[in-house]
Amino acid sequence: MTDPYSSLGVARDAESDQIKSAYRRLARQYHPDVNPDNPEAEEKFKEISQAYAVLSDPEKRSRYDQSGSIDESGGFGDFGQHVDLSDLFDAFFGGMVGGRRARRMSGRDGEDLRSQITISLRDVLTGVEEKIRYKLMARCSECDGSGAEPGTRPETCGTCQGAGVVSRVQQTFIGSMRTSTTCPACAGAGKTIASPCHECHGKGLAVEEVELSVTLPAGVEDGVTLRIAGHGSAGLGQGVAGDLYVVVHVRDDARFERRGNDLLGSVDLTFPQLALGDRVKVDGLTDELDLEIKAGTQPGKLFRLRGEGLPRLHGGARGSLYVRVNVVVPKKLSNESAELLRKFAAESGGPVPQGSSGMLDSLFGRKKGKQK
């Protein structure tokens, strides 16, 4: 018999909230819909469902703690009895019922929000603190979030008795299933309002623009989403505020191409510099860097400058800057320069170029297509 505590990964003295949280997390991970054609995931899902059916029921949990089983066969028995489907809804939809967040008796949680920040590649090197402005739903200052006109107060809903949800029990092939849906009378609020607040029209919330400082760590990647807990829209009643999700965009830098923690740049050099060697300056993220070009360097060669890239997100050595060598060919030559190139070609044993029509025009002072 599998130990239900081990199946859910919780301690034997775990509270009910800890048990429920562990079950939801594992249900999301091993549900057959998430793992199609995976028998092992299906078996694991059955195992954690059995474990939760025991540990979520105080009587069954007590029997298991005393005897190591809950039925005479030594197994879990009819684990499907009285499993609350709302736990599965919570596991996959965060409490969504019928496409909306379920209201609980204590109130309604606030909505999550989304914002964006654009930073430079240099900000990725050092980390940066940015201020963002965004709009959220805050508690109405006129009615303090009650939704009722000042001097009045909401009344408990007679249909759900303030629970915000109505429940019913269904008989299924795995036993009795209790399902909960949003109360149709109060739309899940648990209360009804006879005299709505003139400011928020009974919603209890009003639009407000806020400013927030967001610290972005060094090494942050483009497209990363940061979760800032409690900075979304306010909840109603005892509901908690939603979260703010900030998407980070890193602005393109024309000098570099980012490849993880490494950077790829380039430097334009002339043929004499490659042939004879030289010491040149190349762009780094913050300063110019010295680069030694050895005689005979070939076009396209990559030079690696260690520690001149970007830092890792969670610390550690910086990446490298790779510099690719490009050859710049002059578009126009003087007569003397062209003659020197021909002599060089002859001395090196290679073919002596005759020059294109454009080059000949340059040498003889004529424009292409024009006769004298």
Image: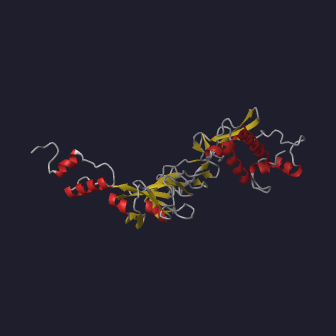
Which quadrant of the figure contains the N terminus? top right
- Chosen colour scheme: secondary structure
- The relative height of residue 13 versus residue 24 in the rendered view (above or below) is below
* Residue 9 visible here: yes
Q: Tell which of 274 and 18 is nearer to you.
A: 274
- x, y percent for residue 331: 25, 52
Q: Tell which of 95 and 290 is nearer to you.
A: 290
- x, y percent for residue 94: 62, 47
Which quadrant of the figure contains the C terminus? top left
- x, y percent for residue 238: 61, 55
Q: Residue furthest left?
A: 372
* Residue 130 visible here: no
- Give me the residue at 85% from left, 42% from top: 75
Q: Which quadrant would residue 302 be assigned to in this image?
A: bottom left
279 left or right, relative to 217:
left
Q: Tell which of 329 and 217 is nearer to you.
A: 329
- Give me the residue at 85% from left, 48% from top: 64
- The relative height of residue 185 versus residue 280 in the rendered view (above or below) is above
- x, y percent for residue 117: 45, 56
Q: Tell which of 300 and 238 is nearer to you.
A: 300
178 left or right, relative to 315:
right
Q: Which quadrant would residue 48 be assigned to in this image?
A: top right
- The relative height of residue 10 versus residue 90 in the rendered view (above or below) is below
- Give me the residue at 15% from left, 42% from top: 369
Q: Residue furthest top?
A: 173
- Give me the residue at 75% from left, 49% from top: 8
12 left or right, relative to 22:
right
> How many numbered circles does the render carry?
0
